């Protein structure tokens, strides 16, 4: 049983511009914590599992908010709320995949305050880690989930490397499917990282879910027009239909030439520590007629290479069924 003592002290800063936030991050380094809507953050702090010295609230920085059309596609400020992404007419019209996924995150209350930047930057949802145990991801030397008795029903099928946690975000697979780019600002200036390279697994860095450095801020997400107006499919399977994290989710976009699948991107979430692009499925479906036979052939490749843990083998047929539906029912 964990002891709920006094909440540890931290300083709260509310900078009104990006430069102010960046200089605070530079000062506090790993002791600083970027705060957006707080829906991932507050649990960590209330549970005493993370104890930053300074919370740097990004909520007052106007330049990090809003959705705009650009010559190349759209740009979404990282502090834009999930409900705004879900309800934006521009996103609904051109990138219905992302609008749908944002509307499937958590509960209405959380979508009203949680941000798109926080959703793609959120940390792993592993029971053991979140209850403050000193596992590999927390800097320790064991994994409590990857044991014969471990609670690993929600954990990964692919990409295990000491840690078997998954990416729990519903919008992250859409970013990879839509070929988004993430704009990061830090003391050395701005860098733009493809969504496929933004999310990282434990073999790259076991304590981080993304390439964002402690002194950087995700400022915007850019979505090119490549997949604008494409046929799309998003489905999330969770234990409950009210708020709940995905057991597996799927995000796909498809361009058609008549009845033939001209091009497709298809990505699964919650099966590894990063959104998993299903390239074998894409190759099998490209150039094929969109019918039951193609859907079945593609589905049979969906979970190739999976290495299930003691309690998550059910994710294999789940992935196969989601791929079948993504191709057949988009
Ligand atoms: C009860 C509950 C149910 C949930 N269900 C789901 C679900 O079904 N699907 C789903 O996808 N998520 C779910 N979540 C997670 C929730 O959606 C995310 O935690 C939320 O979107 C995070 O956004 P936020 O703005 O509140 O993030 P915060 O808590 O403010 O930040 C989250 C993390 O991202 C970092 N961060 C935030 N913004 C930036 C930035 N601009 N640059 C760099 N780092 C940044 C923070 O430092 C922190 O580490 C759930 C959460 C709860 C509490
Ligand atoms: S799966 Fe990862 S986060 Fe969970 S206990 Fe193992 S090392 Fe920690």
Image (cartoon, grey):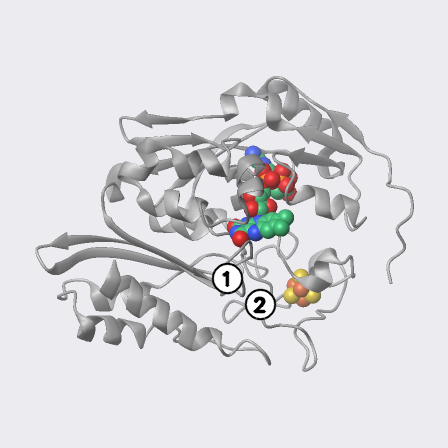
Front position in the image: 204 or 236: 236
Q: Residue at 78% of width from left, 61% of height from top? A: 133
Determine whether, in the image, residue 185 is placed left or right of residue 137: left
Query: Of the residues under marks 1 and 2, which one precedes in the sequence?
Result: 2
The quadrant of the image that shows the N terminus is bottom right
Element marked by disc 1? loop
Q: Residue at 62% of width from left, 72% of height from top? A: 152
Q: Residue furthest left?
A: 258
Label of residue 13 in the image: none
Q: Position of residue 211 (x, y in %)?
A: 55, 45
Q: Is residue 73 visible?
A: yes
Residue, disc 1: 270
Q: Is residue 305 visible?
A: no
Q: Position of residue 45 (x, y in %)?
A: 76, 44
Spatial distance from mark 1 to mark 2, Cα to Cα?
A: 8 Å
Residue, disc 2: 154
Q: Tell me if mark 2 has few (under 14), some (14-19) or many (20+) residues whose alpha carbon lies within 10 angstroms of its own.
A: many
Q: Tell me if mark 1 has few (under 14), some (14-19) or many (20+) residues whose alpha carbon lies within 10 angstroms of its own.
A: many
Q: Position of residue 91 (x, y in %)?
A: 34, 36
Front position in the image: 143 or 87: 87
Q: Pointer 1 and pointer 2: residues touching (CB < 8 Å)?
A: yes
Element marked by disc 2? loop
Determine whether 104 is above or below 8 in the image.
below
Determine whether, in the image, residue 18 is placed left or right of residue 192: right
The quadrant of the image that shows the C terminus is bottom left
Determine whether 84 is above or below 315 in the image.
above
């Amino acid at each position: 049983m964990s002891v709920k003592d006094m909440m540890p002290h931290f300083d709260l800063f509310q900078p009104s511009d990006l430069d102010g936030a960046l200089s605070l991050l530079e000062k506090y380094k790993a002791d600083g914590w970027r705060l957006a809507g707080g829906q991932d953050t507050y649990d960590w702090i209330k549970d005493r599992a993370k104890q930053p010295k300074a919370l740097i609230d990004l909520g007052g920085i106007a330049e990090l908010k809003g959705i705009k059309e650009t010559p190349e596609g759209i740009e979404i400020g990282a502090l834009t709320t999930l409900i705004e992404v879900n309800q934006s007419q521009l996103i609904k019209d051109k990138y219905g995949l992302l609008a749908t996924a944002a509307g499937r995150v958590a509960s209405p209350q959380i979508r009203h305050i949680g941000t798109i930047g926080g959703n793609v930057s959120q940390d792993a949802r592993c029971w053991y880690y979140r209850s403050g145990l000193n596992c590999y991801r927390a800097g320790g030397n064991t994994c409590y989930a990857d044991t014969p008795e471990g609670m690993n029903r929600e954990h990964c099928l692919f990409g295990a490397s000491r840690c078997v946690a998954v990416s729990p975000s519903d919008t992250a697979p859409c970013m990879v499917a839509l070929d988004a780019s993430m704009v990061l600002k830090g003391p050395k200036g701005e860098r733009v990282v493809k969504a496929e390279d933004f999310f990282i697994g434990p073999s790259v860095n076991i304590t981080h879910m993304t390439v964002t450095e402690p002194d950087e801020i995700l400022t915007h997400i850019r979505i090119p027009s490549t997949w604008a107006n494409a046929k799309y499919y998003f489905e999330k399977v969770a234990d409950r239909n009210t708020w709940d994290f995905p057991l597996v989710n799927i995000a796909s976009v498809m361009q058609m030439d008549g009845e033939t699948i001209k091009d497709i991107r298809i990505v699964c979430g919650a099966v590894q520590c990063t959104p998993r692009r299903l390239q074998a499925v894409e190759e099998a479906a490209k150039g094929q007629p969109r019918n039951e036979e193609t859907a079945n052939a593609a589905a049979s490749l969906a979970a190739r290479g999976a290495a299930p843990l003691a309690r998550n083998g059910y994710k294999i047929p789940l992935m196969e069924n989601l791929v079948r539906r993504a191709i057949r029912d988009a």
